[in-house]
Amino acid sequence: MYLSSLNLENFRSYTHQSFSFDKGFNLIIGNNGTGKTNILEAIYLLSTGKSFRAAKLSQVVKWGSNYASVVGTLNRNSELVELETQIIADANLPVKSAQKRFLINKNLKTRKNFLGVLKSVVFQPDDIRLVTGSPSRRRQSLDAVFTQSEWRYAQALAQYNKALKHRNELLDLVRIGKSQKAELFYWDQSLIKNAEIIRTYRQQFINHVNQFWAASTHPEIQKLFLEYHQSVITADKLTRNYPSDLDRGYTSCGPHLDDFHFMSHIFTTTPDKSLSAWGSRGQQRLAVLGIKLAEIDFIETRTKEKPILLLDDIFSELDTSHQELVVNICRLYQSIITSADSEVPNLPQITKIISLKTA
């Protein structure tokens, strides 16, 4: 399976634009501001229903418009499948009211039946913040893996977030005497049930990454491991935490507080093996590449389909050995790569070049 074409309407900087791709290496060349990353973002939207850049999906709609469309054509064993995501952002409604519609071969589909038809993994220079950044960023990276591979996870996460919002609001109402403590019971049960589903899937991914790294032939990747820190939520714990939760109006346990840390056995002289504390920039970058490689393997193992690799100008950030590591993986997948430089080191023969000009 590979993406053969992409059509954009009112998406970011594009009013109407079409692109075609080869099933091998595709290089998108252009200066900053020419819309290279917009193309990758559109492909990722078809894959996950989300943007890897925008905090609010309405931000992908071209300024002055209230509608955007991304259409991609997949070649699956010579059979063509057309995917379309439409974003409707009514100017008369709040930004958060932007709506999505999903279509396959022009037939309207539910989100459940649409997401994951096209699978992708994105590499960005900013990914190094997975090691050094906030826990919320790492949780989002876990969520992104399952959005396109496990509908049950996506459903549980949505229900969990809904219950968490209502429980926190209810805590405020109980504190000021406008609601009763007993009203928390329903939301507590929803949190506990969906948290277990989320925890199970996250643990599976963490285990897969650690097994993938341990089996690697790369000596530094072989020393890496993830340390998963779960925030367990149970009925007893919610009861114990109730006084402090009531005081703060915030639920103080659950997967919304989960985290994981990048570790390495290379640090033999200290009990703390954290890459965020002790790792060099190069070691941290290798760990991020490592988890992306593990994500590719996880998606392919679970779904029996190869994801498309989306690489957003990362080669300028990598040294020669890391460039070669990425290229060797890219040989096995359709890869769409952006660069400001037409001479990307260590890339094999490019099968398709797309040159973008400044508008």
Image (tube, rainbow, N blue to C red):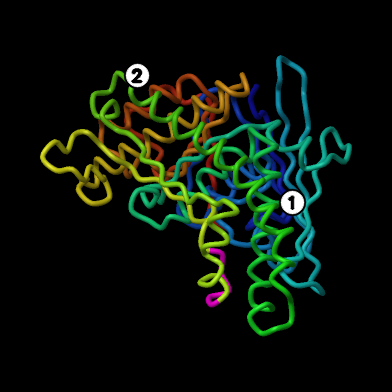
Determine which quarter of the picture holds residue 174.
bottom right
Over which residues does the magenta segment extend? 247-251
Query: Is residue 248 in the magenta section?
Result: yes
Secondary structure of residue under mark 1: strand
Q: Is residue 86 above or below residue 345?
A: below
Q: Check disc 1 and give the amino acid type.
A: Glu
Outermost residue on the right side: it is: 107
Residue furthest out toward the bottom: 176
- Nearest the viewer among 58 and 270 is 270
Q: x, y percentage for residue 250? A: 56, 69
The amino acid sitting under disc 2 is: Ala
Question: Residue 68, labelled with which disc?
Answer: none
**Where does residue 307 sit, x and y in percent of width and height?**
57, 28
Q: Badge 1 is on which residue?
A: 9
Considering the numbered disc 2 on the image, is that residue within a helix, a strand or a loop? loop
Vertical side of 55 occupied by 51: above or below: above
1 is within the stretch colored magenta: no
Nearest the viewer among 235 and 136 is: 235
Q: Name the spot of residue 118 as percent of width and height, x first.
A: 67, 32
Q: Is residue 273 left or right of residue 39?
A: left
Identify the residue at horizontal 10%, vertical 40% (top origin).
269
Question: Disc 2 designates what residue?
Answer: 215
Residue occupying the point 59% across, 47% down: 41
| Secondary structure mainly formed by the magenta segment | loop
